[in-house]
Image: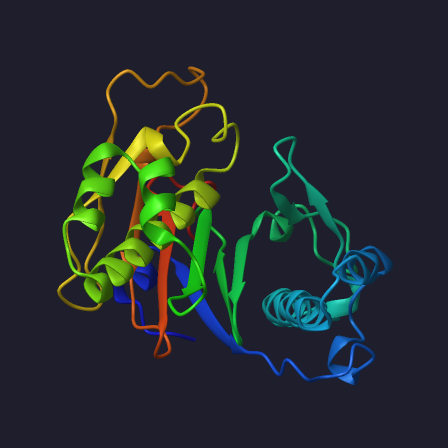
């Protein structure tokens, strides 16, 4: 488990998984995957993408199975209306209360991150900063104006790092928020402010004026986030809801 003190205080675990991209898809480590997960992996054109997806799902099953004290292969997943995955109840002893454990995963390059919490909604993102990407153009397209200006206003190396810091924070927050985010605030509907000068600094979130959302949806400003130390060449962030989804035990 990674050391992210603010997340731990909120009851959020963050796990780092190293992925062997040359592993076989019929590896014993992937035996817990269900038919749907295997079909999803088979859709990838590149073998390493299939391995990355499968290894991440297997690691998620292992982590959840350990915490619920059930076989990883017995876990059953469902999806919210928005498509956000969650545990379904009734998996060999994983009753409705236990199935309320929230989780989120992200993978890039040779690593995956898993965020888990029994009391809050969580989101996580990891990105390789070395990937071929026109980050200046992408930032100008999807970032809030002040974020795009900040990325464009620094030299290439610092600009690339700033882009991925902002991107991972926004992705983690969006994934934690979940329902309706694509048609509500979206990536450009809120700004991540503040520069990271050390590990663990919290992104400051400001919702852009004029953004509309459904009255029942929580604002993205109701979530906390932290950057944390990722493997060399990667950026990472975890986010969680301030409001409890269930009482802490």
Q: Is residue 142 left or right of residue 203?
A: right
Q: In the image, residue 151 lies at what x, y percent? A: 22, 49
Q: In the image, residue 29 lies at what x, y percent? A: 73, 81
* Residue 55 quadrant: bottom right
Instruction: State which quarter of the image contains the C terminus.
Output: bottom left
Check the image and report above or below for 27 versus 126.
below
Could you tell me which residue is drawn at 81 percent across and 75 percent down? 31
Could you tell me which residue is drawn at 25 percent across and 26 percent down? 208
Could you tell me which residue is drawn at 37 percent across and 57 percent down? 238
* Residue 174 quadrant: top left
Check the image and report above or below for 80 versus 161.
above
Q: Is residue 194 left or right of residue 186?
A: left
Which residue is at the front of the view, 70 or 147? 147
Could you tell me which residue is drawn at 79 percent across and 84 percent down? 28
Q: In this view, does 28 lie to the left or right of 207?
A: right
> In the rendered view, how is the structure colored?
rainbow
* Residue 82 quadrant: top right
Which residue is at the front of the view, 108 or 10? 108
Q: In the image, residue 51 lies at what x, y percent? A: 69, 72
Check the image and report above or below for 241 versus 167.
above
Q: Residue 242: tell me if it is visible.
A: yes
């Amino acid at each position: 488990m990674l050391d992210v003190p603010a997340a731990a205080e909120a009851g959020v675990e963050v796990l780092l998984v190293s992925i062997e991209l040359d592993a076989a898809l019929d590896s014993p480590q992937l035996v817990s995957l269900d038919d749907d997960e295997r079909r999803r992996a088979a859709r990838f054109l590149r073998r390493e993408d299939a391995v990355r997806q499968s290894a991440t799902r297997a690691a998620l099953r292992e982590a959840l199975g350990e915490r619920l004290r059930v076989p990883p292969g017995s876990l059953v997943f469902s999806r919210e209306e928005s498509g956000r995955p969650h545990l379904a109840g009734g998996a060999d002893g994983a009753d409705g209360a236990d199935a309320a454990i929230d989780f989120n995963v992200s993978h890039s390059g040779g690593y995956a991150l898993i965020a888990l919490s029994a009391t809050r909604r969580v989101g996580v993102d990891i990105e390789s900063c070395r990937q071929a990407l026109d980050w200046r153009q992408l930032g100008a397209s999807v970032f809030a104006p002040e974020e795009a200006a900040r990325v464009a206003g620094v030299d290439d190396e610092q600009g690339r790092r700033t882009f991925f810091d902002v991107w991972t924070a926004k992705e983690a927050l969006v994934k934690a928020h979940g329902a309706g985010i694509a048609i509500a605030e979206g990536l450009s509907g809120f700004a991540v402010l503040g520069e990271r000068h050390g590990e663990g600094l919290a992104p400051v979130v400001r919702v852009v004026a004029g953004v509309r959302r459904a009255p029942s949806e929580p604002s993205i400003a109701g979530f906390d986030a932290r950057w944390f130390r990722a493997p060399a060449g990667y950026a990472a962030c975890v986010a969680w809801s301030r409001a409890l989804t269930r009482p802490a035990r």
